[in-house]
Amino acid sequence: MLCLNRAIRKEKKVLESIRDLVTDANFDCAATGCSLQAMDSSRVAMLSLLLRPDGFEHYRCDRNISMGINLANMARMLRCASDDDIVTINADDAQEKISDYEMKLMHISSENLEIPEAGYEAIVKMPASVFARICKDLGTIGDTVMISVTKEGILFCTRGDIGTANIFCRKTTPVAKEEEAISIEMEKQVSLTLALRYLISFTKATPLAKQVTISMSYEQPIVVEYKMEIMGHIRFYLVPKVEEEVTVPLENVAEADTKSKPDVKPEVEEKPKEVIEIEEGCELKAETKLKPEKNDIDDQSEPKLGTKPKEGRINETMLQVEDKTEVEVMDVE
């Protein structure tokens, strides 16, 4: 038997923050609280949610129970209640129902996601509203963002078709309001490239907390955490993007090496000389123009980036050679 009772304001915000990332999920309820772990369909992002019993006016769980819930349907039901209304959720594993609104539970096959509590090389705490504004603004410029953490502050960089954007948040000195401060704990500098669309989705949890904690480390997913005071926390995990190495075929490398030599010029194939037999006393006149213009060879030896090679130039030269080569043989008595 599970019974939850509290004002619905927080629960509505929690569901709104995760329903775009995960469609169906299992809520695992125990005497210590309710937890949820799920991954998105592309298996790039993951979330971990914890709701402690202290966050409810009344919490009772007789034995462990797992509730498979469609988050979109749950959010639709909770919209019927205003933020200050008290909502009671009862779950009985015998009837497989949730009421006051009755919604059938789902049998969702799920894997146990063991999230290691590893140490991170850089941890940044900043106002959640500032982080949400940065992600939203950068999302209008590019698709990815590089986040770099130094002792001086945190830098957000993006690049897109319309230009680039750089936003630097300097580490603040102690201020009166802790939620407005930007603090950094780091062992070494860290720079990671992330997909902005996931970060923008994470910022839907901004109403749940005044501050956001960003934990970063190389070769580990980034963690974006929102702490909901005594109620619990919600953590989002995102795998950084890795730049793919381009493998060049060996034949292309050999061709590139040949073109990179500045002194190499294309060889002009010489036609075999014709042997003409004439009688004694005959006069031979021959006029041949085989030397093409110097610029024609230079243009073909090393094509420049951004320009197209002048195709057919050699053929034109050879045609001129054939047209302008005249051999006249005159018989003299």
Image (cartoon, grey):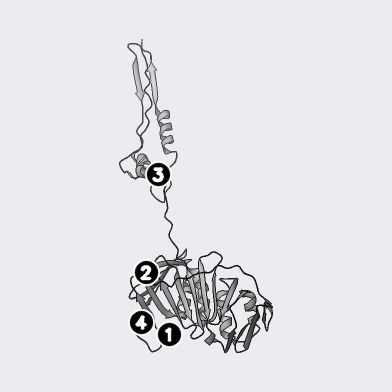
Real-space Cα separation, disc 4 to disc 3, in angstroms: 53 Å
Q: Is residue 88 visible?
A: yes
In this view, the residue in front, 131 or 103, is: 103
Q: Is residue 77 left or right of residue 194?
A: right
SS class, disc 1 = helix
Q: Can residue 133 be seen in this view?
A: no
Disc 1 designates what residue? 179
Residues marked 3 and 2 touching at CB (< 8 Å): no
Disc 3 designates what residue? 250
Image quarter hosting the C terminus: top left
Residues marked 3 and 1 touching at CB (< 8 Å): no
In this view, the residue in front, 123 or 136, is: 123
Other residues around mark 2 within 10 Å, as few (<14) / some (14–19) / many (≥20): some
First of labels 3, 2 by sequence position = 2
In the rendering, at what x and y percent does residue 26 appear?
59, 73
Q: Residue type at mark 1: give it.
A: Glu
First of labels 4, 2 by sequence position = 4
Q: Tell me the number on the disc at residue 190.
A: 2
